[in-house]
Amino acid sequence: MLKCVLVGAGGFIGAVLRYLIGLIPIKGNDAFPFKTLFINVAGAFMIGIITALAERKNINPNLVLMLQVGVCGGFTTFSTFAYETSGLMKNGNTAQAVIYAVLSVVLCVLAVFAAQAAIKAVISR
């Protein structure tokens, strides 16, 4: 039961952060989902940091669960990503949809590697 509460609390934090970022006005956001792209990359970077720290430091597994599954799960928006990509395609913006999908996947994977490398460099000092 404790694990469910921790994931729920983390999910609340992540979802609220995602909501607050969604309130930030960005010109041209209707043409391209920049905020969702940012959220996905930032979430991937966060989960990379959490994973790297958990592998190298003695961190409470419950905290790792709360941060990875709860906060990152509530924060990242791949369901929204899929919806927005399909919307771009339905509206005839296939090139934007492909660019958005490729950027989302490539940048998020790179963000995980970058975060892990950064933590390794900091901890190795």
Image: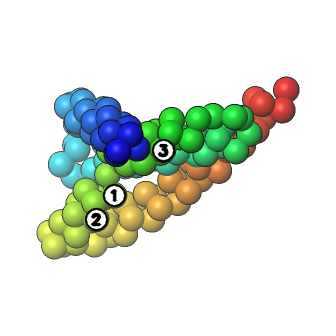
Query: Could you tell me how far apart the alpha carbons at marks 1 and 3 are, in whole angstroms?
Result: 19 Å
Which residue corresponds to mark 1? 78
In the image: residue 116, left or right of residue 102: right
Q: Three-letter amino acid code at disc 3?
A: Leu
Quadrant location, the N terminus: top left
Comparing 35 with 119, the one in front is 119
Res 104 seen here = yes
In the image: residue 121, left or right of residue 97: right
Q: Which residue corresponds to the image point at 21% horizontal and 52% vertical from the top-left?
A: 31
Mark 1 and mark 3 lie on one chain; the one further toward the N terminus is 3
- Mark 1 or 3: in front is 3
| Secondary structure found at label 3 | helix
Which residue corresponds to mark 2? 82
> Across the whole image, how many numbered discs are drawn on residues?
3
Mark 2 in CB contact with mark 1 (< 8 angstroms): yes
Q: Position of residue 122 (x, y in %)?
A: 76, 29
| Secondary structure found at label 2 | helix
Mark 2 and mark 3 lie on one chain; the one further toward the N terminus is 3
* 92 up-or-down from 77: above or below: below
In the image: residue 77, left or right of residue 41: left
Q: Position of residue 32 (x, y in %)?
A: 27, 52
Q: Three-letter amino acid code at disc 2?
A: Ala
Which residue corresponds to mark 3? 65
Q: Three-letter amino acid code at disc 1?
A: Phe
Query: Could you tell me how far apart the alpha carbons at marks 2 and 3 are, in whole angstroms?
Result: 25 Å
Mark 3 closeness class: few <14, some 14–19, many ≥20 residues within 10 Å? some
Comparing 117 with 4, the one in front is 4
Mark 2 closeness class: few <14, some 14–19, many ≥20 residues within 10 Å? few
